[in-house]
Amino acid sequence: MALIVQKYGGSSVADANGVKRVAKRIAESKRAGNDVVVVVSAMGDTTDELIDLANAITPLPPSREMDILLTAGERISMSLLAMAIANLGVEARSFTGQQAGVITDDVHGKARIIDVTPSRIQAAIDDGAVAIVAGFQGVTQHTNDVTTLGRGGSDTTAVALAAALKADVCEIYSDVDGVFTADPRIVPSARKIDRINYDEMLEMAASGAKVLVLRCVEYARRYNVPIHVRSSFSAHPGTMVMNYEPAEGADEGADVEQPIIAGVAHDSSEAKITVVGVPDVPGTAAHIFEVVAGSGANIDMIVQNVSAAATGLTDISFTLPASDGTLAMAALSESQDEIGFASLQYDDTIGKLSLIGAGMKSHPGVSARLFAALSAAGINIEMISTSEIRISVVTRSDQLADAVRAVHTAFDLDSTEDEAVVYGGTGR
Ligand code: ADP
Ligand code: ASP
Ligand code: MG
């Protein structure tokens, strides 16, 4: 008998039929003799609709109220799912994040889980019931305020519960059959990956592959929780995300079997800010990025031009989530005289492509092949950044999908089998 944590995303419970279909699947796992804990997301695009609703009331909703609003989405799906399971003759109890013991810091809208004390979940399991937990939400340690974990946060709830309950596996059910070599929505020839290690999955998630949210992968790596990413619409085995070593007894030559490239990720949710006419003296970059950090923005790539000899002035460009753009621009404008730059430019029509693979550490020529593929496809590169196992480039956003397909093909990632299936979801 195993303890399984299963997470069902919004596309899996988009309507009443979806809820019933998922309930059947859960009841089957339970009847097969497993202890089952379920984390569920809000139905379909409910979270987006709630955000739209709040924005129709006020352009800057107070973050505490926003969190209370958004947690309502998961309360709807958790209770409906518990009813659907009970209908099948299996006992089920639903719990909010607070009832499930998900304790977070107090950063509304992107709270971090600091502890999970799932005594009520354990009690439900001990009673033979299926526990259903509302994903994406928790409660602050000191003030008991309701928080949300950031978009896609139900994945993190599931992994955190799996770690706290010492579950055997955390199954993340979505609308695709697993983690693919690229987003199947834009690369139909993407190939399903059977097994991927935490480091590569971390880079994929950080680079925009939203099939798993970044924090859930960080959490899984830290607590060594194996994740099985699969579809709730099919019975196909999905992708295992876990630490793995080369096969037992394999010599160095066996490493050749490991693909050099795990996949290509893309992200069109970032924007680029250029600070024009910056005095090229020590301390200026520090000043600029202190101001940006103070606005709460997370910076991604940074490029500084060589300064013009005649003027001693340079330009600094950086990328950040577009959702942080307004506040970062406002903070910089306010400090213009102090920093002494000439002007600011804002561009949210950029796209980022990332090539990820642990094998690139030991294989020369990966960047050359990437740039050649982009140039052959007529795609201009605006910025570049690298880590040990990733190369990212910024392009125009309207060229991003073509860029991903060209690079996917150039690295021989296209599948020779059937096209990847996207079972549901609106891709929103
Ligand atoms: P859920 O609602 O189940 O949480 P998400 O929409 O958050 O689902 O994540 C699933 C989506 O992630 C897929 O529909 C797919 O478009 C997208 N995706 C992006 N990159 C990848 C990838 N490399 N492999 C699989 N899916 C990906
Ligand atoms: N409902 C939340 C969202 O749409 C959390 C999640 O689905 O994981 O982001
Ligand atoms: Mg998701």
Image (cartoon, helix red, strand yellow):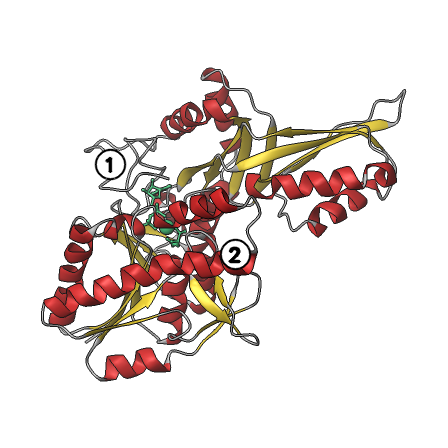
Q: Quarter of the image for the C terminus: give it.
A: top left
Residue at image mark 1: 420
x%, y% of residue 348?
57, 30
In front of the other: 258 or 223: 223
Q: In the visual, does 278 lie left or right of 423?
A: right
Is the CB–ligand 2 distance for label 2 below 8 Å?
A: no
**Which quarter shows the N terminus?**
bottom left
Depth check, mark 1 against mark 2: the one in front is 2
Q: Is residue 396 visible?
A: yes
Q: Name the residue beneath numbered marker 2.
A: 109
Residue 248 seen anywhere in this rendered image of the structure: no
Q: Secondary structure at mark 2?
A: loop
Q: Earlier in the sequence, mark 1 or mark 2?
A: 2
Q: Is residue 339 left or right of residue 203?
A: right
Tag 1 and tag 2, C-beta contact below 8 Å: no
The Cα–Cα distance between marks 1 and 2, rounded to whole angstroms, is 33 Å
Identify the residue at image location x=10%, y=67%: 88
Q: Is residue 306 placed above or below 60 in the rendered structure? A: above
Q: Residue at x 35, y 49 (%)?
A: 46
- List x then y, in percent, for residue 152: 41, 52
The three-letter code of the residue at mark 2 reads Gly
Residue 274 in percent (x, y) is at 70, 31
- Depth order, front residue of 235/416: 235
Question: Which residue is most to the left?
Answer: 89
Amino acid beneath label 1: Ala
Q: Quadrant of residue 392?
A: top right
Picture quarter containing residue 126? bottom left
